[in-house]
Structure formats: C-alpha cells, structure tokens
Amino acid sequence: MMIEEKYSAWLACPAMNTELLEDLRAMDEDRKHDSFYRDLAFGTGGLRGVLGAGTNRMNLFTVMKATRGLGAYLKESFPDPSCAVSFDSRIHSQDFAELTAAVLASMGIRVWIYPRLQPTPMLSFAVRHLHTSAGVMITASHNPAKFNGYKVYGSDGCQITLEAADRVLHFIRREQDLADSLPDFGHYLQQGLISLITEETIESYYQAVWKLRIRPSDQPLHLVYSPLNGTGNVPVREIMKRMGSIRVDIVPEQELPDGHFPTCPYPNPEIREAMALAIARTLEINADLCFATDPDCDRMGAGVRSGNDVVLISGNDMGILMLDYLCRNLPSASDLPRVAVKTIVSTEMAAAICKKYRVELRNVLTGFKFIGEQIGLLEKEGHADRFLFGFEESYGYLSGTDVRDKDAVNAALLLCEMAANLKAEGKTLLDRLAELREEFGFFAQRLLTFEYEGENGGKRMAEIMANLRQPLSSFVMDPVPESRTDYLNDETGLPKSDVLEFILPENRKFIVRPSGTEPKLKAYLFARGENQIQAEAELDIMEKEIRKLCDPAVSF
C-alpha cells in the first residue's frame, strides 16, 4: 500500500481518536512521508519511536498490532500463556499498557498488570515471581518526552532473544494496521482475564533488593535524589527509608511523575544537564552526594560533592567501584569462583580487579539481556549463587538474581551502603576511585554518537559499517588498526551481532556498532595511561580519526 493510501485509511478509521485525527490532519507532505514510509521497527528491544499517528510512530494502533503479534507467538509457544505488564510515567504509557493487557486478554491470554506505574526491574521481577510466559514494559527509557516504547520480556525475566523477536515479528507482519474498534480494558478486568498485581509482589521485590546488602552501616549519610519525574520515586525512597541512617532530600521539581519532563529535555542521568538540579541542591544543603534514576528506573547516575563542585561518576567508574566493593567483601573462598559479567564496550579495569580477587569475568555483547542470560546459564548449572555482579557502561548495574535486567533500585542500595562505609573510613567514592587508579592504572573511555535521521539514515549507517569492514590497509587513519574482530562474521563465542572491534597500538581500541533502538552509530573509545591527562590525550587523538570514519556527511 502506498503512503497516500495508508494515510487515507488512517483518516477513515472509525476507531481513530481525536488526538490522532488532529495529528493526521496537521501533517505536511514531509511529515506524512516520515510517518508512513515504513512500519516502526521491532527487535529484541521491542518498539521505540516518536509519539503520533502513522505506521512509523508509537500510537494505539502500532501497540495493538505489536501486541497481537506477541499474543500469537505466546499462543504458539505456551499451552496456557500469560503475561505481566508495567508502564512508566511517559505520555500515554498507561494507555498503551492497558491496551496491551486488553488485546492479550481478548486473545484468551491471562494478564497481570501493575495498578500504578512501576520501574522496568519490577516488571522483570513480576514475570519471574508470577511465573508468566512473558512481560511487556511500556517505556522509552531515557529518551526525550516525544518518544515512547514497548519492551518485551521472556519467561526468564530477560528481554526476549533474537530468535523470539524474529518469531514475534513474523506474526506482527501478518496483522492489519488498523481495526474498527479497540478492546476495552475495563471489560476484561471485570471478566477476570486481567488481574491487578498485588502488594504481595511489590513487597517481595523490596525484600529481594533488601537481601542484597553486603555490609550494612549505621554511618549517617546525607544525599540528594531525583527520580527525573519517573518511576523511581516510591521504590527508591522505600529502600532508603529501610536503610535507616540515610537522610534523603528530593529534587522537588523532579519528584512526581511527569512524562513531559519539564526540567530536562533528556531525562538521562548520564548527562550533566539532567543532573543539574540535583547538583545545585547538593551544594545548597551541603549533602554528601547526589544521584538520579532515569524514567523507568533501570539506570542510575551519581555525583560526589567535592569542595564547591559535584564530580559526576561515569557508568564505567561506578561499575568498577561497585565491583571492587563486592569483591572486597566476598565471603571466604568457595570451590567455584564467583562470576562477574560486563559488556564488551565496558571498561577493561574490571579484568584487573577480577584477577586480583580470583573472580571469573565474562564478557558479553551490548545489552543487559546478555548479562541476564549468563545468570540463567549459571542457574541451569545449579550455581546461580556464583553470580556476583553485572554492569554496563551505560549506567546499568545488577547484583542479584531475582531480576534479570539492570536495576537502579538495587544500584541505589549498593551506592548508599558503599558510600556510608567509605564515609566511616573518612573517605568518599572519589577517594576510593583514586586508590584503584593508583593500583591498576588509569583506564579512560569515551562514547561518540553519530545520528543518521530520515529515510536515508539507515542506508548511510549500513554504508559506513560496510566501509569499516574493508581491508585495514585501506583505512585513512593514523595509526591504522593492528587487527579487527567482526562479531557478525568471525567466530567469537558470542551470538552474531553487527559490532566491529579495532585494536590499536599502546593499549588502545575502539568498537563501533549500530544502536538497537535508534538511527545512530555508537563508537566506544578505550585508552590506558599512567594518569588521566595521558589517557584523555590518547582519546582526543582517537576521536579525531574516528569522526572521519563515522561522520554522517562524509564518505570514505
């Protein structure tokens, strides 16, 4: 069907609501084309896109179509299929969640849904706790307010596998874009095919996090917390309250759920601008540190007051601090070593720490589902208790096995306990990080992101990845890489993935991969030096060369 035909069909659809009709009528030709030239992509990350009317937008009809595809997959795969559903604070998240539940229920699938917004890790927990066949989380994580998304989880509580995503997509493609009516959530709730998740599940989650304490401290700690107008406000503060000795000041402008994110266009705790109010509050009240969680509360970023400033800690450095804390407090040696897991794009300092404490380190592809998968493998061997910690450079951490995705509530517990114990020694997180750098050297990392928007964006990304697979001798960069690992075509022991790793002289490397959810290429730069100045200088040189390779406007 051509774009104009699709557009006309959407205008004529009897189930189209006023908001979507107004959006359709306001479209110029360019926006009409972008809204209808393709279907919103579905993969292991589910759906993610801009809110609005059209097949390439997040709306009630794209959610219904995806859910019918998921439902068909579940009915094919399970004799008595069921699904847990949760949602964050974004625009229309609750609407999409209730529609997801209603569509599944209309297909005869049992559904459990949280009665109010809850974090992504609590969806993963609910899948496992309620023994459902799958889970759906309505969220676009830390993207701007104009986005929303639809993440699918398997029965193990991890995001679905590549194989499962392909099968779901097969069924999605068989579904119609539109329908004359939408199923009613209230009807199926009354019929009992949809049930509200109870406080028993919520309290069980809190207990699962609470048991992850390593070395409880009664050292008073004063901190500032921001939920960034997302889902973290209640669960994070509940855990802080149970810790007892933590004084928590909330950033008032970012306390309550608000999908418009009025104080920060990018509600991402990796970005200093998103942390600005928490930083200001920390300095104003002289708190020890501050931290924030993203809207679906799976990522956490933190900063430590140092004089008249707050120094933010990167995702890699926080991962190292937590890994070090867990390793230093390991119980006496057992027959089998504990296991830590990180993604291939995360810091190599983890290897040095694991070697010191005789912890097995496993490297996996980018995506926390692969860390969760390693827990599952240990579980199948009867050794789930060997799992110690998993982290990724993009501010995701996990130290338990009841959740199979990154968990910012878990991370907040570790952060506060670790900071309190260091404070009792007269130290801060920054002091401990300096000690680690003194012992193991300075490991520096940098992330570059290249955006390729519009219909031709995907083609340009594919062209650049193809160019990066050309013989190394053809590379116009200094120095030319010594070697390359192609995770799509080489035997690496990991699932096939469109990722390229290049080794440069003198402990330097870079990794390039397409984003799984957005039209972007990501380049991860790694260098090691005796100090920060040396390591950062190496990264500066690498960045200039890599920008030549990946610039959206430049051809080789």
Image (cartoon, rainbow, N blue to C red):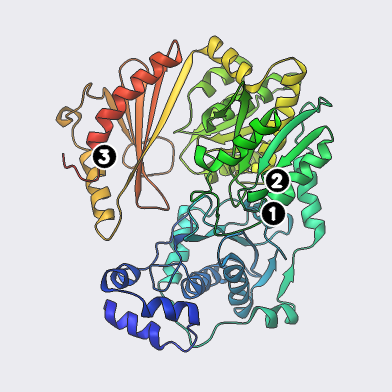
Q: Quadrant of the C terminus?
A: top left
Q: Quadrant of the N terminus?
A: bottom left
Which residue in the protein does label 1 denote? 128
Residue 273 place in picture, x, y as percent: 50, 41
Labels 1 and 2: the sequence-earlier one: 1
- Evaluate whether residue 327 shows in this view: yes
Which residue in the protein does label 2 denote? 402
Instruction: Please state which amino acid type lies under the numbered disc 3.
Output: Cys
Task: Assess whether mark 3 and mark 2 are in contact (beta carbons under 8 angstroms).
Answer: no
Q: Nearer the viewer, residue 39 or 442?
A: 442
Instruction: Please state which amino acid type lies under the numbered disc 1.
Output: Arg
Which residue in the protein does label 3 denote? 550
Q: Secondary structure at mark 3?
A: helix
> How many labels, in total?
3
- Say if 14 sits above or below 430 in the image: below
Q: Secondary structure at mark 2?
A: loop
Report, in whole angstroms, how far the alpha carbon at label 2 lies from the one at label 3: 40 Å
Residue for point 60% across, 43% down: 406
Is residue 163 rendered to the left or right of residue 469?
right
Closer to the eye: label 2 or 3: 3
- Say if 60 sits above or below 182 in the image: above
Q: Residues within 10 Å of mark 2 (few under 14, many from 20)?
A: many
> Which image quadrant is residue 92 in?
bottom right
Residue for point 75% across, 78% down: 192
Residue 3 place in picture, x, y as percent: 28, 77
Residue for point 29% across, 23% down: 541
> Which image quadrant is residue 299 in?
top right
Instruction: Please state which amino acid type lies under the numbered disc 2.
Output: Asp
Q: Residues within 10 Å of mark 1 (few under 14, many from 20)?
A: many
> Which image quadrant is residue 259 in?
bottom right
Q: Nearer the viewer, residue 142 or 190?
A: 142
